[in-house]
Amino acid sequence: MKQHSQHLIPGLAILIFSLAAPFLFPNYVFQFALLWLMITFALTWDTLGGQMGYNSLGNIVFFGVGMYTSALVQIGLYYDIGEYTAAYGAILVQYDMEQYFTGLIIGLIAAGLVAVVFALAFGTIVFGLRGPYFAIGTLGVALAAGELVGAWDWVGAGSGISMPVYPGDPDDRALLYYFLLLALGVSTFLFLMWLYSTRFGLAINAIRDDEEKAEAMGIHTKRHKTVAWSVSAFFLGISGAIFGNMAGFIEPLEVAFPTITFGIFMVVMCLLGGKGTLWGPVLGATLFHVVKEVTWTHLLGWQWVVLGLLIIINVVFFQQGIIGWAQDKWPERFGIIVEDDDALLAAQDTAEALPDKGVG
Amino acid sequence: MELIEVSGVSKSYGGVVANKQISLKVRRGRITGMIGPNGSGKTTLFNSIVGYHPIDEGSIKFEGKEISKLRVQEIARLGMLRTFQQTRIYGKMNCVKNMLISVSHRTARFGDMFRPYSPELEEKAEHLLEFVGLYSKRRLISGDLSFGQQKLLEFAMALMSEPEVLLLDEPTAGINPTLINGLIDRLKQANEEFGITLFVIEHNMRVIMNLADNIYCLAHGEMLAEGTPEEIQTDQRVIDAYLGAH
């Protein structure tokens, strides 16, 4: 765990603040919950877009698939789905505590697993594409998914589904979903931190830098790409399930498959913080969310202009994002150093004692 | 015994016949050279051998096993690696990471993806970087190294993988003349000490004559001559091909 020690202090500080935040700022629980959703978005997008160099514009599919999966599981356990979602002839729906939580837990797990199945299926198709074609291909999948669900009557089609109502105090409900999203965000971060420290991390970096070389060296590229996408899909699927329940009402275009909002935010947050690094997505998501919410509150009408400006400044002046820029400016802080040839022999003895200071 | 046996291989790109009925043998434990003017089909033949593209006809055997239908990764995992004429390394990673990811994937099972690297492998990576003279730069981003240094890194990465045979596409192109002697020594060392069979494309006659045990010469996609360095140097057809007298 030596190489992880650098993450300990900022990590603990963020965790302690996040545990206390809903009690310190009770009016902002929903905002903090959204922030953790954004962090999960950015982290999972970065696995492909940053670490592996496959810029997906379709990751939002897994969010929507997870959301609908958990809705169908939660409803299907106790009611007939067709009757529940029918536009007319409403049936009386009432969940007690035990039913609600049983459905929620099974729903979250199913959401992750079904999203992985979708990732495996789509992976066999879209991983034949590279570069911009991959981006466009995945975007097509995302747009099609929203439209297909919107035309599917059994799941409520365009008029959506009202999720089971939490049978308790609304404040408790807000806290429940805040802590679920917090737990998901933290788990995603810790899982990816471990994953990037294994051979897997270097292998997907190699695919990013030169996939043809990676093939020529015998790396199982397809295997790595599929696993990377499945990991992304798993956490995104669960995030969709939690968000669907938190929102209370889900429908295909704006909530489940919002390609032009959440789908693009994922990309922008990674670019802002610095893609291909562990902390970049966290930093980018936080900054982006704060700017977005502040402008929504204080500059209403200009919010998209401000966000656009932020993206332009990012793309023109800080293409590598904040962490990438810092790495260029202070390379020695990130362990990018030349060692004097005279020091070579001395360094050899201490080589093992040198901590790996790389951020990625 | 032959490690690689190419017989009757042809490859065309549209109307251009890049390789025509090429046959050659690379013997285990030796250094085999391949020369020929620009556009004579050397790199095409390399690409055919490592499975980069399908061949039109003929057979390619590695350790007696037909490999002409296998894909690039499968061939690499049999223990046949190649370096590229336009050097290819993982440009955004530091040198040590470039080395570690080059550990052989020959026996990698699914679960091996999630294993960490052992300190022994890190030591080996640093040792090989020292071998090619890049130890002090091992923490630098490899894309920031000079072209020659990248070439040395690519060579070290290939050694890290402990291949049976290494196909080198112009290993000394773009390398500072004073470094070339050092590189020749290291190629010979890799062959003698690590037991790696080498198959080398090279334009620099001094290098290839010093290095190879046996040399093939291609011209216009056809096999022109084969022999020891002395035989090739005195072969009138080879001299004509290089001077353009035909």
Image: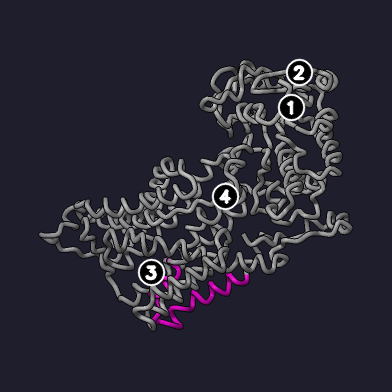
Q: Does residue A21 belong to the magenta stretch?
A: yes
Q: The numbered mark 2 sits on a residue in which chain?
A: B
Residue B183 falls in image quadrant: top right
| Amino acid residing under circle 1 | Ile
Residue A177 has which mark? 3
Residue B237 has which mark? 2
For the residue pair A296 and A220, the one nearer the viewer reads as A296
Q: Residue at x 34, y 77 (%)?
A: A171
Q: Are marks 1 and 3 on the same chain?
A: no
- Residue A212 as seen in the image, left or right of residue B161: left
Magenta span: A9-37
Could you say where residue B57 lies in the image, as x and y percent from the top left? Answer: 55, 18
**Sequence-first disc among 3 and 4:** 3
Q: The numbered mark 1 sits on a residue in which chain?
A: B
Query: What residue is shown with label 1?
Result: B35
The quadrant of the picture occupied by the N terminus of chain B is: top right
Q: Determine the secondary structure under disc 2.
A: helix
The quadrant of the picture occupied by the C terminus of chain B is: top right
Q: CA distance from mark 4 to mark 1?
A: 34 Å
